[in-house]
Image (spheres, rainbow, N blue to C red):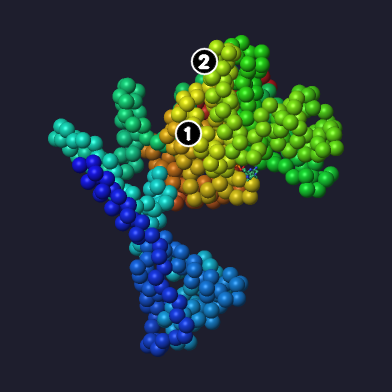
Amino acid sequence: MASSRLGRVLSNLARSQSRSYTPSIKFRAGASTAAAQRTPEEILQQLRSLLTKDTSIAGIQQLSNEWFSRADKDATKNLDKSELSSLMSSVGMPLSDSEATDLFALFDTKKNGEISYNEFTTTLRGKMPQFAASLAFMDQYRGHYPSNMTSVHSVLPRFDSQETDEWVESLDAVIQHHGPTRTRFLMHELMDEAVRKGVKISSSITTPMCNTIPTELEPEYPGDLAMEHRISNLIRWNAAVMVSDGNKRAAGVGGHIGTFASICDIWEVGMHHFFRGKGFPGGMGDQLYIQGHAAPGPYARAYLEGRLSLEQVMNFRQEVGGNGLSSYPHPRLMPTFWENPTVSMGLGPLSAVCQARYFRYLHLRGLADTSSSRVWCFIGDGEMDEPESIYAIARAGYERLNNLVMIVNCNYQRLDGPVRGNSKVIQEFEGLFRGAGFDCIKLIWGDAWNDLVDNDHDGKFIEVLERTPDGDCQRYAAKNDGALLRREMFEANGIADRVAHLSDEELMSAYMTRKRFILPSPRQQKMQNQVDARQ
Ligand SMILES: Cc1ncc(C[n+]2csc(CCOP(=O)(O)OP(=O)(O)O)c2C)c(N)n1
């Protein structure tokens, strides 16, 4: 039985692999005989059939790119009429002069006398059913890329089939009468309820794209929010100024500003409330592995605390001459400041796992009390791509290291571009961590945006958020345009009513978690009152 099932799976896989791209269209020199006058649409149709012949979806995509670069002989990244005509001849479809003029006009959608790459590929691919199907597939949850594995799934041994069938029929009925959004909601609720009641089911690898801790379960913030906010603003500012000032005085010094800016708040919460110093009872304190290029933050904090001088701060990245600060956490260069090195990328997570394991070893061997010592590892979303990071996660899960906390700073960027613009990295990483056995807490939205999520009465808003790729999320932030956000995220998805009470500016502010504009919950109102009273 098992082997025949394995055989089916393997042959399925083999079939799917054989479908991968093998270009079968060869470019021909010279023209064959010209056909009678055809409309540009007819020519386009013929071209598409040629393109789709014996080719997978990935192949179509690749081939249309390839055609463009071959046609663009003068490498201007635009095609003129003669380039389009010679492309047509080279694929065995020569055009008469008037056909060429008409086809050119069809491709030149912007009517500016040239065909850009975008105009070429979108016109050529058009609404080809194969391509539309692939796009629809990409739209599915948890499936960012077309996969051939959908038909391969494990089947549990069947027993009490009648009852099972009734459940499946109920599911079918919900899908039919209430649609996938409602079905998805019901399924999540049922699974949560089962887990709450102690049923051990295989948990899903990702959870919905919202904060893991629901608003009503958030505890009162234990600190002085106004004061902590002020401190983190000062540190963020000093970190940015230190880097830009260093670069003004000595060109090429470099340094990072965005990394610390995006992690400052959670870092400060740790500093005020979580990280344990060497004197903490029951251990030898916590160990921190700081995201390497966030180093300006700890320097700026140390300056505020009086642990670093102005001269040191002004010599950021210029320590060779004496009294300066190393670019990254570096215990050998700054032995009284840094405990753990974290650049190059991947080193931090790997070392953090070894440290946590060593704490555990010391304790179990009775060599030292490390029962209260924890390891905190801050890591960037780009850094999550390093093989060391992935291995570290798997290893920590395998070792059951519950003295290790990993914080992934998902700012969607790595130096000069998005981490993976066409994906949802937060969801992806959640799957990685949960798969390895970690508890995973997602903190995605601030209060104002979270209110929209909390008031999502039918699950449609969360669905839209899950479908919006990171690249678009970044674009909305960069454009800083509430009208664009409203148009693309809400109106285009038929949920404009959710934000009708917000102006474009308020909507943008909520998205950027700048300020609350929606009525706060009683708990949040109480918190705000405390803050106001202290100011
Ligand atoms: C192994 C290695 N490769 C390249 C670099 C150069 N580098 C420094 S920071 C960085 C991008 C980091 O991206 P991410 O982890 O997302 O951090 P953030 O965007 O928050 O700074 C790169 C590639 C490095 N430090 N180590």
Q: At x 43% / y 49%, what residue is drawn?
A: 144
Determine whether 134 is above or below 98 in the image.
above
Name the amino acid type tagged 1.
Ala
Q: At x 46% / y 75%, what residue is drawn?
A: 106
Depth check: 318 or 11 in front?
Answer: 11
Depth check: 423 or 58 in front?
Answer: 58
Depth check: 85 or 14 in front?
Answer: 14
Horizontal relation, residue 188 to residue 89: left or right? left
Determine if residue 303 is in view: yes
Q: At x 37% / y 51%, what residue is drawn?
A: 147
- Tell me the element at label 2: helix
| Quadrant location, the C terminus | top right
Snapshot quadrant of residue 18: bottom left
The residue at which mark 1 appears reads as 394
Horizontal relation, residue 186 to residue 392: left or right? left
- Give the mark toward the camera: 2 or 1: 2
**Horizontal and vertical percent for residue 277?**
66, 17
**Horizontal and vertical percent for residue 487?**
50, 51
Snapshot quadrant of residue 170: top left
Q: Residues within 10 Å of mark 2 (few under 14, many from 20)?
A: few
Q: What whole-number distance in Å separates the C-alpha atoms at marks 2 and 1?
A: 22 Å
Depth check: 33 or 495 in front?
Answer: 33
Q: At x 82% / y 38%, what residue is drawn?
A: 320
**Horizontal and vertical percent for residue 339?**
68, 26
Determine if residue 229 is in view: no
Label 1 beta carbon less than 8 Å to ligand 1 = no
The residue at which mark 2 appears reads as 364
Q: Quadrant of ligand 1?
A: top right
Determine whether 12 is above or below 200 in the image.
below
- Sequence-earlier tag: 2 or 1: 2
